[in-house]
Image (cartoon, rainbow, N blue to C red):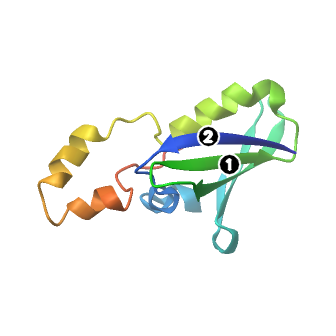
Amino acid sequence: MLQIALEIPSPFNFQAVLYSHGWFQLVPFYWHTPSGTLFWATRLPNQTPVVLQVRSEEKTREKTILYLNADTDITPHKDHFIGKCRHIFNLDLDLNPFYRICRKDPVLYSVISSGRGRLMRSE
């Protein structure tokens, strides 16, 4: 089994991203609440089906790690799946302009501290 670890700068809240939209409840995703794991059925670039497992772990207040596991050897396609993961969880979206607005509003301020603001996308 291969495990890929993606370091995500805070604020980032894995469950908040999942729950921000209904994608996690639709195929090709399956959310397993007890284990906090998102199962994701996708394909290798050669069209071979693969099921990936994504979970997160907050390492420090400054960073969270997203773990991407596969039962199939996806080593040759590691960069491909990192790119898809970055896309699905909107990891390259610059939220600083949004957070600047949130800092000025007492109701929205909690958005920052709770790591909210990203929307999950389909692949």
Q: Dot 1: what SS?
A: strand
- Say above or below: 109 vs 63: below
| Residue type pointed to by label 1 | Tyr
Q: Which sits earlier in the primary sequence, circle 1 or circle 2?
A: 2
Using the rendered view, name the quadrant where residue 123 is placed: top right
Residue drawn at x 44%, y 57% is 21
Residue position marked by numbered label 2 in the rendering: 6
Q: Nearer the viewer, residue 34 or 57?
A: 57
Read off the residue under disc 1: 67
Q: Is residue 26 visible?
A: no
Q: Is residue 37 shown above or below 80?
A: below
Query: Which residue appears farthest toward the bottom when viewing the image?
Result: 34
On screen, residue 9 versus residue 3, left or right, reads left
Q: Give x and y (percent) for residue 7.
A: 57, 41
**In-image side of 47 versus 121 (left or right):** right
Q: Position of residue 106 (x, y in %)?
A: 14, 65
In the image as oriented, which residue stretches furthest toward the left? 104
In the displayed structure image, the side of residue 113 where residue 47 appears, left or right: right
Residue depicted at 17% across the width and 66% down the height: 107
CB contact under 8 Å: marks 1 and 2: yes
Q: Amino acid at mark 2?
A: Leu
Question: From where the camera sits, is residue 67 visible?
Answer: yes
Residue 97 screen position, x and y as percent? 22, 39
Where residue 82 appears, x then y in whole percent?
A: 64, 33
Q: Residue at x 61, y 55 (%)?
A: 56
Rounded to the nearest angstrom, the CA distance separating label 1 from label 2 is 6 Å
